[in-house]
Every structure is written in structure tokens, then in C-alpha cells.
Amino acid sequence: MPTFEQLLASPSLLALMLLAALFVGLSKGGLPAIAMLGVPILSLAMPPFIAAFLLLPIYIMSDAVGVWLYRREYSARNIRILIPAGVAGVAVGWATAALVSDDAVALLIGLMGVSFVLSHWLTSQSNTAAKPADVKKGLFWGALSGFTSFVSHAGAPPFQVYVLPQKLPKMVFAGTTTFVFAAINLAKVIPYGALQPFTQDTLSISLLLLPAAVTGTLLGRYLTHLLPEKPFFMAVHIALFLVSCKLIINAAPNLF
């Protein structure tokens, strides 16, 4: 893990971390797909778990801002289903952390990113009626969200598979996302600390990145209202696809 001094001495690494913190903030402001770019970008410069570990305090700080911004806009039923399931998924991720190599995690992140983007590009929009929140499906997808969030802060795809068919209002969807992952991220503090103890360097790095994360959160909330979603998310999906392909290319030869 880079020290605070090493981070300051490496402009390229600092730029990557500031960009990742900004993406985290944007996701907490209402643009959840952007968060998936954080760990893949940092994984190009460090092991995936270290990238996830360094970003956790940023997620939690951004969560606090996001929860306040969306304090009146969320789906209470989905929260009651998804938060317990997500915490259980975090526990499964913790229990299996020692069994998975860095290359396997990188490959998982890459495959998840590619499959998510291809699914978005190839699946046509349907005019089917909105589906209600279902307990059994919610427990499954919520647990999967918690697991993938523990591994790589990439819990958005399983969450979206479950929630998007409900066709919630845009702001309610964003608020529900923020509340669910705020709880999941808090649940990761003890497991992450057990696997990689938090240090003074961790706190110093988090404080350095905090302004970028808070700025991203406020900007994300603003952009949720203003920007056309289709072209904006297309650019995000292209970036995620390219980074994910790079991770797969790097990790696959070491595993097969």
C-alpha cells in the first residue's frame, strides 16, 4: 500500500486517486454506475484489494453527504430487504477473502465490468409494467451486491438487476442506492480492518481525497437533475469497458 509521502511524490498516482475519489462522489450524488470505475482504475497501479481498501473511507465519507442529500427520497421497502442481505454478502466476502488471489479478483472485476456494459448495450428497453419489490429476489441480489461490493466496491450491477425493473422514480432510485450502499460500506469497516489494518497513512490519504469526493457528491446530485442520461452514461460505459478489458488481459495469463 502506498504511504502518504509516496502518494505526494507520484503525480500520476495522486491523479488516479483523485479521479477515483471524484467518481465515488459522483456515484453517491445519484450516478451509481460511475462508482464501478474507481477500483478498476486504481487496480492498474496497485493490487485490487489495496485499491478497494484505500477507497473505503472515501465511500463512507461520501455516503454521509449522500444520505443527507437524499434523506427524503428513497424506497423504504427496498431498504428493509436489501440492507440485511447486503451485510450478509459482506460477511461471505470476508469469509472467502483468503481463498481468492489478486489476479482472480482483478479478473472478476474485469469480467463484471465487461458483462455489465455488454448487457446494457445489447438489451433493448422494454415497456413492461413495473415489478414490485420481491423479498426472495431482493435477498439474493442484495447478498450478491454485498459480496461484490466487499471484493471490489462493485455492488451496483446486482443491485441494478433487482431494482431497475421496479421502475422507481429517478431520485428515489438514487436515494435507495445511496442508503443501501452506505450500510454495506459501514459493514465493511471491521472486515477490511482485520485484513489490512487502517493506519495514519490511510487517514491522511482519505483526508487528502475528501474534497474531491464531496465535490463529486454535490456535483452528482446536480447532474442527476440536469444532464441527459443517455450520452453521459454511454461515455462512462465505454471507459468502464476499456478498463475492464485491460484488467482481464493482465490477469488472465496468470490464472490459466
Image (cartoon, grey):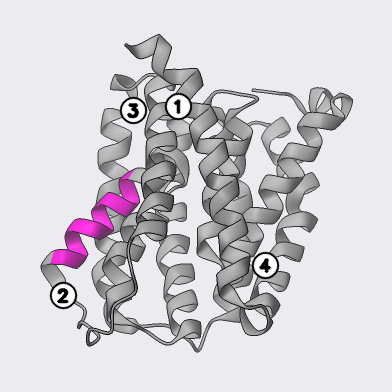
Image vertical order of residue 32 relative to residue 207, above or below: below
Disc 2 vs disc 1: which is toward the camera? Answer: 1
Residue 158, quarter of the rendered image? bottom left
Mark 3 → mark 4, Cα distance in angstroms: 30 Å
How many marks the image carries: the answer is 4
Residue that carries the numbered disc 1 in the rendered image: 248
Instruction: Report the span colored magenta.
Output: 137-147
Image vertical order of residue 254 relative to residue 219, above or below: above
Determine if residue 191 is in view.
no
Q: Earlier in the sequence, mark 1 or mark 3?
A: 3
Disc 3 vs disc 4: which is toward the camera? Answer: 4
Disc 1 vs disc 3: which is toward the camera? Answer: 1
Residue that carries the numbered disc 4 in the rendered image: 217
Residue that carries the numbered disc 2 in the rendered image: 134
Q: Are marks 2 and 4 in contact (CB under 8 Å)?
A: no
Disc 1 vs disc 4: which is toward the camera? Answer: 1
